């Protein structure tokens, strides 16, 4: 039987369908005649509720192993759910436990964990609602970025991660070397002897792929880079990152107006795609981070406004400004 993703079942699953899911246990609630087990496979914010009855073969042994964090395969039949906020649930006919989790030592439990604590368990933090939502939204953003430029006829250029270029002095660079830092070779003038290094000259992690993209645009007309970049500024603020992914389009035959048109179309496309693909994740993140100025209904309205072609001379301009002023008073 083909395994189904939980997101697909929550959105498209129909009662009386026989399905199989492979996931991890989130929670378990035991009743007298059955148990409710919530499982999640990472495809959605919400999990799938599974009803495990006492008539399941080897019920006592199986239910004892269904602790938070256990990996399982469950087959059964979908049924309408009477629970709040869920359309269907799975009536388990068979349960296979791939890997158990000791409830005494498994660090993730049904409570809110601080980000500071989650940093200490990097191998498990992506199973939490917060980090799961972040990674799904990030995935949607990356997909939208590629889709937009590919649909516009751009060529994706893979620019070097290791480079000798400072890219217009965009920031402090991380050095890349194979030299023994405990015994750095020196020239007669006491300078570092890079002839003994792997590349024979100073090399760094890239801060931008712009230089290579400009060169490629002179052959392919419209290109874009999208990949990791690095900055070595020693600043622990929310506005500084040591590593991040950057989008850099370059166009050979394009004036300022065309550049503005592309940037506007790009942002509209990405916003709309993310809101259509990850509405539950976006709503969760907005509420979890308490971004009061950015409620889901406001984002939906902004996406609708973004679909209009609004210019200063357009009759829609004044109305758009009024709506945005209502959404973000004082901004």
Image (cartoon, rainbow, N blue to C red):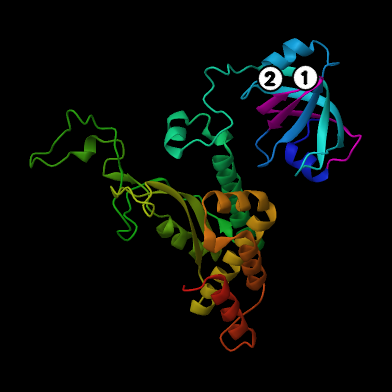
- What residue do we see at 79% from left, 10% from top? 58
| CA neighbours of label 2 inside 10 A, class few (<14), some (14 to 19), many (20+) | many
Task: Name the one closer to the observer, 134 or 138.
Answer: 134
Q: Which residue is mark 2?
A: 66
On the image, which quarter does residue 8 sit in? top right
Residue 145 screen position, x and y as percent? 59, 56
Relative side of 128 to 195, left or right: right
| CA neighbours of label 1 inside 10 A, class few (<14), some (14 to 19), many (20+) | many
18 in the magenta segment: yes
- What is the magenta range? 13-40
- What residue do we see at 77% from left, 29% from top? 50
Residue 95 badge:
1
Q: Are marks 1 and 2 in contact (CB under 8 Å)?
A: yes
Q: Name the quarter where the N terminus is drawn.
A: top right
Whether residue 19 is situated above or below residue 132 in the rendered picture: above
Q: Can see residue 223?
A: no
237 in the magenta segment: no
Q: Secondary structure at mark 2?
A: loop
Residue 87 screen position, x and y as percent? 81, 43
Picture mark count: 2
- What residue do we see at 26% from left, 44% from top? 201
Label 1 or label 2, whichever comes before in sequence order = 2
Residue 21 screen position, x and y as percent? 76, 29
- What residue do we see at 23% from left, 34% from top? 196
Relative side of 35 to 320, left or right: right
Nearer mark to the viewer, of 1 and 2: 2
Whether residue 222 is situated above or below residue 38 in the rendered picture: below
Task: Name the one closer to the observer, 100 or 211.
Answer: 100
Residue 330 badge:
none
């Amino acid at each position: 039987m083909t395994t189904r993703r939980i997101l697909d079942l929550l959105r498209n699953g129909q009662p009386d369908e026989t399905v199989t899911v492979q996931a991890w246990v989130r929670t378990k609630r035991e009743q007298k005649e059955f148990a409710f087990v919530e499982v999640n496979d990472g495809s959605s914010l919400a999990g799938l509720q599974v009803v495990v009855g006492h008539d399941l073969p080897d019920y006592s042994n199986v239910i004892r192993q269904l602790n938070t964090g256990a990996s399982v395969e469950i087959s059964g039949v979908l049924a309408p759910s009477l629970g709040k906020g869920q359309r269907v649930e799975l009536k388990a006919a068979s349960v296979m436990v791939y890997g158990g989790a000791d409830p005494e030592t498994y660090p993730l439990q049904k409570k809110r964990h601080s980000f500071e604590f989650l940093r200490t368990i990097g191998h498990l933090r992506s199973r939490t609602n917060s980090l799961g939502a972040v990674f799904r939204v990030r995935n949607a953003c990356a997909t939208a970025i590629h889709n937009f430029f590919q649909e516009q006829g751009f060529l994706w250029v893979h620019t070097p991660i290791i480079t000798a270029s400072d890219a217009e002095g965009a920031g402090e660079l991380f050095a890349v070397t194979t030299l023994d830092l405990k015994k750095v070779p020196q020239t007669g003038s006491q300078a570092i002897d890079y002839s003994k290094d792997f590349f024979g000259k100073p090399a760094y992690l890239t801060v931008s792929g712009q230089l290579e993209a400009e060169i490629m645009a002179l052959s392919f007309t419209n290109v874009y880079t999208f990949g990791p970049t690095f900055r070595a500024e020693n600043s622990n603020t929310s506005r500084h990152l040591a590593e991040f992914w950057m989008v850099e389009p370059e166009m050979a035959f394009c004036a300022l107006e065309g550049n503005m048109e592309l940037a506007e179309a790009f942002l509209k496309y990405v916003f709309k795609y993310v809101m259509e693909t990850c509405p539950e994740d976006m709503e969760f993140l907005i509420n979890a981070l308490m971004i009061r100025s950015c409620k889901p209904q406001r984002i939906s309205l902004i996406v609708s406004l973004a679909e209009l072609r609004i210019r200063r001379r357009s009759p829609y301009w004044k109305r758009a400004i009024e709506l945005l002023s209502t959404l973000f008073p004082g901004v």
